[in-house]
Image (cartoon, rainbow, N blue to C red):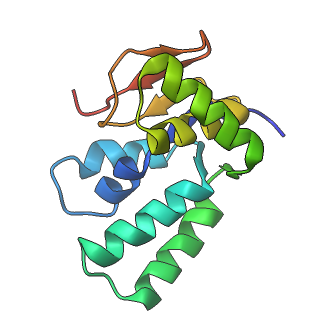
């Protein structure tokens, strides 16, 4: 599988599908080849239902669309979990953030787009966290 440079955190997906002022920047990222993980899809479904009050039918449709649009979707397996524990320890990260980062590293991504993590932080000399809204 060819490596995809850009991994999109859940908040990028949520903004891209919203009417928020951050939507244009998030939508621009989604027009480029991007990777996500199964956790991204799960987090999106949770946020869409609990915070945005989206119907399950619309959530399922959007998840299907995201799975079609993404150039790669990383799984969260035993190795990802172990890698996430290591990243959380070394970079003082929340576990679920570290899990997403581990999935992105496994996919070979060099850019991790998120507004929730430290902009400019380089993970394992391989991947840079970028806040596209700065």
15 relative position to 122: left or right:
left
Instruction: Give the quadrant of the N terminus.
Output: top right
Q: Residue furthest left?
A: 21
Residue 52 position (above or below residue 12) = below
Q: Quadrant of residue 29?
A: top left
Q: Is residue 94 above or below residue 76?
A: above
Q: Residue at x 51, y 81 (%)?
A: 61
Name the image quarter holding residue 18: bottom left
Looking at this view, is 26 or 122 the one in front?
122
Residue sitting at x 47%, y 45%: 96
Position of 21 compared to 10: left or right? left
Report x, y in % for residue 90: 52, 17
How many numbered tags mark residues here?
A: 0
Could you say where residue 123 lies in the image, as x and y percent from the top left? 54, 17
User: Which residue is most to the right?
Assistant: 1
In the image, residue 91 lies at what x, y percent? 46, 19
Q: Residue at x 37, y 15 (%)?
A: 120
In the image: residue 44, left or right of residue 84: left
Note whether 54 is above or below 133 in the view shown: below
Question: Would you identify the image quadrant in which residue 130 lies?
Answer: top left
| In this picture, residue 132 sits left or right of residue 35 | left
Image quarter in which the C terminus is found: top left
| Rendered residue at 60%/43% (across/down) | 33
Residue 72: give x, y in percent of width and height: 69, 49
Q: Nearer the viewer, residue 76 or 57?
A: 76
- Rendered position, 98 above or below 10: above
């Amino acid at each position: 599988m060819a490596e995809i440079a850009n991994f999109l955190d859940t908040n990028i997906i949520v903004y891209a599908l919203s009417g928020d002022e951050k939507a244009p920047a998030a939508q621009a990222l989604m027009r480029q080849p991007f990777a996500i993980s199964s956790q991204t899809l799960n987090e999106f479904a949770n946020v869409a239902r609990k915070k945005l009050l989206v119907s399950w039918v619309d959530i399922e449709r959007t998840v299907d669309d995201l799975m079609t649009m993404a150039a790669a979707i990383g799984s969260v397996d035993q190795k990802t979990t172990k890698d996430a524990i290591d990243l959380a320890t070394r970079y003082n990260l929340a576990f679920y953030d570290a899990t997403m980062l581990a999935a992105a590293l496994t996919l070979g991504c060099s850019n991790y787009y998120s507004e929730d993590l430290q902009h400019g932080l380089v993970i394992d000399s391989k991947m840079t966290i970028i806040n596209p809204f700065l």
